[in-house]
Amino acid sequence: LNNSSISRYLKSFGTVMVQKYLPGVIKGDKRIFIINGKICGAIQRIPSKGSILSNISQGGTAVKTKLNLKEKKVANTIAKELKKENIFFAGIDLVSGYLIGDINVTSPTGLPQYKELTGINLAKNFWDQLESHHCDICSGVSFLRCVSGNSSLRHFSGFSSLRYFFGILITAAFFWCP
């Protein structure tokens, strides 16, 4: 990239997101899955040879991983904030212990790879937790029962976005392999 291509991009779109290059990206990133404010699992995504893109859809490969203390601290801090914002399911990406990019709330990919590597079905975990999650608005009945019994969408105002809610339901349903 050069200054003229950046200028053209800014004129076309008005905004650009820039992040510091982290040399550790050549070793990949860690996708951390957060359900109901808790870290539930993680995979490391390794870029293909000659690339810095670790997304599975871009040729990256998932491998088993463990989080170090710094990664756990960062992820737990984010998980608490997500819970405060009523974000039930998200994926965050860390490189060298630093949060990069966005927080994936509509379609955190990597669940099939996590299941393949660990035997743990986080999509089922998601559904089980959602079924047992009690809705504050409906005096403590299960959240799914509350939602299914309420035809008015006003009930979803506690969610950051209605699109987010349906996005996680679709994502979890797609990846739930009994």
Image: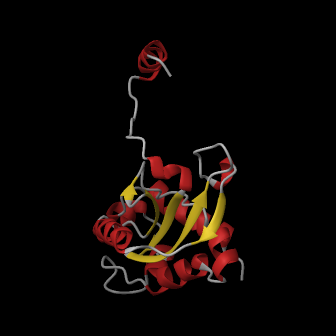
Q: Is residue 71 left or right of residue 46?
A: left
Residue 36 figure quarter: bottom left
Q: Position of residue 138 (x, y in %)?
A: 34, 80
Q: Residue at x 67, y 70 (%)?
A: 112
Q: Is residue 107 left or right of residue 37?
A: right
Q: Position of residue 5 (x, y in %)?
A: 49, 16
Q: Position of residue 79 (x, y in %)?
A: 35, 70
- In terms of depth relative to the viewer, which is nearer, 149 or 22? 22
Residue 123 vertical position relative to residue 31 in the rendered view, above or below: below
- In terms of depth relative to the viewer, which is nearer, 25 or 172? 25
Residue 155 figure quarter: bottom left
Quadrant holding the C terminus: bottom right
Residue 98 figure quarter: bottom left
Q: Residue at x 42, y 70 (%)?
A: 88
Colour scheme of this structure image?
Answer: secondary structure
Residue 21 vertical position relative to residue 133 in the rendered view, above or below: above
Q: Position of residue 129 (x, y in %)?
A: 48, 83
